[in-house]
Amino acid sequence: MSDTLGIAKKEEPPEQPRRFSLLSVIVMFALVGVFLFYFWSGRQKPQTTTKSQIHFPFGSAEQAYASKIQFENIGLNRAENFLHQEITSLAGEIVNAGDRPIRNVEVTVTYSDELRQVVLRESRVLFSPGTPPLPPGGRRDFEISYEHIPASWNRETPAIAVTGLQF
């Protein structure tokens, strides 16, 4: 006589599809939000002076008036941002020594090396949209930031020239 032990197998219930918990949905939305914020905020233009895409007129009237625009108290500052990138800022005051109000000014800033050769030249607009015009005899602070200036720069104050005006 042979005894066989029968082991009864438990029948498992059929697998049910997994449902997302509330916590996993919140985590997914947070990740999507961080992703969108990172890429969207990186494309916004800074509110400081930006590279000029539109060039202002610089005909004979503007060229004659450019000599009445002065730059004073020019200073350079180097700092590190939160991404450990070195930022160079050129700051100063623009003075309207003429008799007309100025809505905006385009300047070309030129950095040179020890041999007085140009290592960086960029045009920038000094006033942001919506800024009131600079009245005759008025002065206004400005700041231009650069993320990268070539290492061959001679560390002297760059040349600033008016290359466009908007009356």
Image: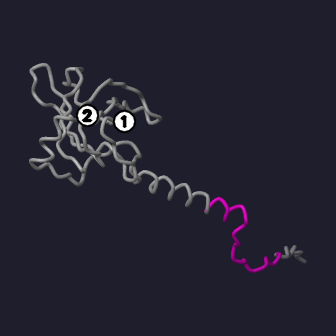
Q: Position of residue 161 (x, y in %)?
A: 18, 35
Residue interval drawn in magenta: 10-28
Q: Residues within 10 Å of mark 2 (few under 14, many from 20)?
A: some
Mark seen at residue 122? none
Q: Position of residue 68 (x, y in %)?
A: 20, 35
Q: Residue at x 61, y 62 (%)?
A: 28
Which residue occupies the foreground of this view, 46 or 99?
A: 99
Q: Which residue is mark 1?
A: 140
Q: Say which quarter of the image contains residue 124.
A: top left
Which residue occupies the foreground of this view, 153 or 94?
A: 94
Q: Residue at x 24, y 50 (%)?
A: 166
Q: Residue at x 37, y 53 (%)?
A: 129
Which residue occupies the foreground of this view, 100 or 125?
A: 100
Q: How is the image coloured?
A: one colour
Q: Which residue is mark 2?
A: 97
The amino acid type, in three-letter code, at marker 1 is Arg
Choose mark 1 or mark 2, whichever is in front: 2
Vertical arrangement, residue 163 with respect to residue 20, above or below: above
| CA gap, disc 1 and disc 2 | 12 Å
Q: Residue at x 9, y 27 (%)?
A: 117
